[in-house]
Structures are given as C-alpha cells and as structure tokens.
C-alpha cells in the first residue's frame, strides 16, 4: 500500500504554520470514538484534518502547533503505552516513541493535557481550532482558557482571539501534491477494477448486497481496508434514490443497476458511479437516456480545465441534458427557459460534482469573494451527471419511468485540462455490453 512519507506531513505543518498569525497556537483533536450499539463501537476513522497534519491514526490524541516555539513547534498528546490496556484495545505508539515515529518535537500522555496545555496557550494572542465540531472539545478549550484567566492577577495573559483553523487548513487540502495525486490514482484504479468486476459477475436474481460483496472483495484484496463511503447498489427503481444504501433488493432481469462505490486508500477517497443493465443489454429507453447522461459527462469533462470556474462543468452538463430531454420529449419548452426556471430538476436534482480528497465530499470553498472558484492544477473533483425518472412520474411516457442513471469519474485538474483517474472502467454502451457478454 502506498503511504505518504513523513516529509510530506512536515511540509504540511510548515505550510500551515506559515499562514498562522504571529504569536498564535493551533489545537486539533483526534476523531471521537462513537458507539454503534451497546458495547460495539463504529470502526475508528481518524479525523481527516488531524491525519493530514500528523499521519497518526490513534484516538484520544490532541495535536498542537506553536510556530516559533523554542523547544519545538509540534507537540502531541497521545495515549500512554499501558500493557493492561493494550491487551484489550491494541498497540499504541505512546509518548516516548512518538517523536521518532511521528516527528513531533514533544509528546505527552493525554491524561496530562489539563496540566500542560494551559501553559502552552498562556501568552499567545490567538488560538486556531475547529470550533463547533465537538461540544466536548469546545468545552475543554474553554476550560483551558479559563484556567489561564483565573491567574491574570498573577500576571498570566489569556488569548483574546479564536480563529477557525479549517479556514487555513482546508485551502491547503484543496490543492493536492503530486504524492497525494498518486495515492488517489491508485485508489481510483482499485475502484475501477471493482466496478469492472461487478459488471462481469452480476446475474438477475442476485441481491444487491451480493453484488456489493464483489466490490468489497476487490477493494480489500487490493489493499484498501474500507470503502470511502457506504456503497450504493440500486437496481431498477432503487437507482432513483440518490443515497440508497439498503442494497437488499433482488436484481430483476432488465433492471438497470446503479453502483456508486469507491475505496479509501491511506485516507484518500475514490468515488465512481457506473450504471449498467442486469442482463447485459440496454433496452431502447435505457440506451437513449444513458447516452444522454454520457454526452453530458463528456461535455462537463471538457469544461474542466484551469481558468474555468467551478460551476462551468455543471453548466455544460445541464445544457446537454436539457437539450436531450426536450428532444426525447421528457421536457417541453425552450431550452433556455427550462434552464432558467430549473425545470430540469425534476430529473436532475444534484450538482455535477464535488471536491474529492481525504473526505469524499472534500473540503475547500466553492466560492471565493462571492464568485465561483477558478479551477487550478492539483484540484481533484468528481464529474457525475445523472438522470432520475421517478417510478410514479406520470408527466412522462411510461417507458421512461423508474430509470435512474449516473456516470461518475474522478478527475485531477492539470496544466492543460484534466486527467481522468478512473478511466480504467468502461462507460461507453458498446464497451459495457461487450464486457458483460464476454
Ligand atoms: N458517493 C457520493 C457522491 O457521489 O457524491
Ligand atoms: Mn460523488
Ligand atoms: Mn459517488
């Protein structure tokens, strides 16, 4: 499995500290442990911001950055190595080994944080933190600051400004380094293989989750421990439910199957959607709508290049979709008016993509100073137009009803245009039919 090296994490911390104001401190907590039911916890997944800066995947940890601190700018609080606890919950790095393994300057037991952290905050003008994400952490932060305030008569100076850490950090995360793009390319290749496998193995009569098992098999065999999000495997009408994850229906002969699934690799997401017929042959109505979505996707990819703004791929996709919907008789009226009034939202109710990175819906602003953001090399996004005709939509001919289609690829913006990371899985009708009949 590809892992980023420690120099990459050091570079990120340095870049963040260069953006912080003078005499400030950044404090970031690890992800919470959450309960699934009674004694069972959800699998722990480190907070993406925390992992971006540390590469450290343990719970109950706090990362502190103090630009210019003489005794070291990077301080970590983490769980101690305690044999009796490690027997139950697994191995820990521990504060002694943390500097060597993680590159921090100082590491302390998390149980000592209330004694140590106020001393690190004291005298700083500003605290950067992800306020509002965890009430427990916000409360802790106030306790540490109040501890300092209680000592002002002894000369202590509490910070007087709080700033959003994510505002600085997410700008860094938005533009991917070459090393990050390589991990994302690998994740995309694994997911492409999984989608190919699903097309090859599907048979009418299977349950949707049995097809999901084929995806999981490829993800894990290829070195990905988890999907980046719950896989969507929707057959027939279920393809029209945008966030369908029950995946427990029987796949019927003649259904279109929409699979939206991507693996996570070393904390980077991939996100692919393919739609294909359960029996290997598109019917005429399925074929017509599928080709329309594919044409819209090509138009959106064409519009994904540096200098274009964030919304241009979406606008390009909508233009093609609306023209096609009018031609096929699903919408009536002038194309411009249907776009203006957003009447197409009856069949296309989401946007054409999102940033992709450590989070599947990744961080980064879509607008800057009120204007759509300009695309630049290193940004990674999805291109995922779709059409969804509700099964009970009696405003259209019966033959269209219950057809749901989405085609989604992951692309990285390059100097000249964009590079499709997920190109290894077919999407042309002829190629899908050929693969499925082989
Ligand atoms: N898989 C979530 C999305 O496509 O946005
Ligand atoms: Mn997506
Ligand atoms: Mn998706």
Image (cartoon, rainbow, N blue to C red):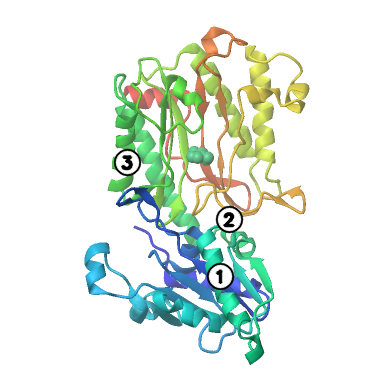
Give the foreground label among 2 and 1. Answer: 1
Q: What is the number of the mark on residue 216?
A: 3
Q: CA distance from mark 2 to mark 1?
A: 35 Å
Residue 141 is labelled as: 1
Towards the viewer: 161 or 102: 161
Q: Residue at x 37, y 20 (%)?
A: 280
In the rendered structure, find residue 378 and report the number of the disc placed on it: 2
Say which quarter of the image contains residue 282.
top left
Pick out the residue farthest to the bottom.
154
Rendering coords of residue 432 (x, y %): 41, 26
Q: Nearer the viewer, residue 41 or 30?
A: 41
Residue 61 placement: quadrant = bottom left
Q: In x, y percent, where is residue 387?
A: 57, 25
Q: Is residue 384 above or below residue 332?
A: below
Residue 82 position in % (x across, y down): 27, 74
Closer to the camera in the image, 5 or 402: 402
Q: Earlier in the sequence, mark 3 or mark 1?
A: 1
At label 1, counting other C-alpha atoms closer than 10 Å, the crowd grade (few under 14, some 14-19, many 20 or more) is some
**SS state under label 3:** helix
């Amino acid at each position: 499995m590809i892992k980023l090296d420690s120099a990459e994490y050091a570079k990120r911390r340095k870049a963040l500290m260069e953006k912080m104001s003078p005499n400030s401190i950044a404090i970031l907590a690890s992800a919470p442990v959450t309960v699934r039911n009674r004694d069972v916890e959800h699998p722990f997944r480190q907070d993406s911001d925390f992992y971006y800066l540390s590469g450290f995947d343990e719970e109950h940890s706090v990362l502190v950055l103090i630009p210019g601190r003489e005794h070291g700018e990077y301080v970590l609080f983490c769980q101690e190595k305690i044999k009796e606890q490690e027997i139950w919950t697994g191995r820990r790095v521990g504060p002694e080994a943390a500097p060597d393994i993680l590159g921090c300057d100082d590491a302390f037991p998390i149980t000592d944080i209330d004694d140590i952290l106020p001393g690190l905050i004291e005298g700083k003008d500003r605290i950067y933190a992800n306020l509002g994400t965890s009430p427990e952490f916000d409360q802790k932060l106030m306790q540490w600051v109040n501890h300092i305030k209680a000592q002002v008569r002894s000369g202590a100076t509490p910070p007087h400004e709080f700033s959003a850490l994510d505002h600085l950090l997410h700008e860094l995360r938005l533009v991917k380094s070459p090393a990050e793009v390589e991990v994302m390319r690998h994740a995309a290749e694994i997911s492409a293989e999984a989608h190919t496998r699903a097309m090859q193995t599907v048979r009418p009569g299977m349950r949707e989750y049995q097809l999901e098992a084929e995806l999981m098999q490829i993800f894990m065999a290829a070195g990905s421990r988890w999907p980046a999000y719950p896989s969507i495997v929707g057959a027939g009408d279920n393809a029209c439910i945008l966030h369908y994850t029950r995946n427990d229906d029987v796949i019927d002969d003649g259904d279109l199957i929409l699979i939206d699934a991507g693996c996570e690799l070393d904390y980077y997401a991939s996100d692919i959607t393919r739609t294909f017929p359960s029996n290997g042959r598109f019917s005429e109505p399925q074929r017509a709508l599928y080709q329309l979505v594919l044409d819209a996707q090509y138009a959106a990819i064409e519009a994904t290049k540096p200098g274009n703004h964030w919304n241009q791929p979406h606008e390009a996709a909508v233009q093609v979709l609306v023209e096609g919907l009018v031609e096929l008789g699903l919408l009536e009226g002038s194309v411009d008016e249907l776009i203006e009034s957003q009447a197409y939202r009856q069949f296309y109710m989401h946007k054409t993509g999102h940033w992709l990175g450590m989070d599947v819906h990744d961080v980064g602003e879509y607008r800057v100073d009120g204007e759509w953001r300009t695309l630049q090399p290193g940004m990674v996004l999805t291109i995922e137009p779709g059409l969804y005709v509700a099964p009970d939509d009696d405003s259209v001919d019966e033959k269209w009803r219950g057809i749901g289609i989405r085609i989604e690829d992951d692309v990285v913006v390059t100097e000249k245009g964009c590079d499709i990371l997920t190109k290894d899985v077919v999407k042309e009708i002829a190629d899908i039919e050929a693969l499925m009949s082989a």
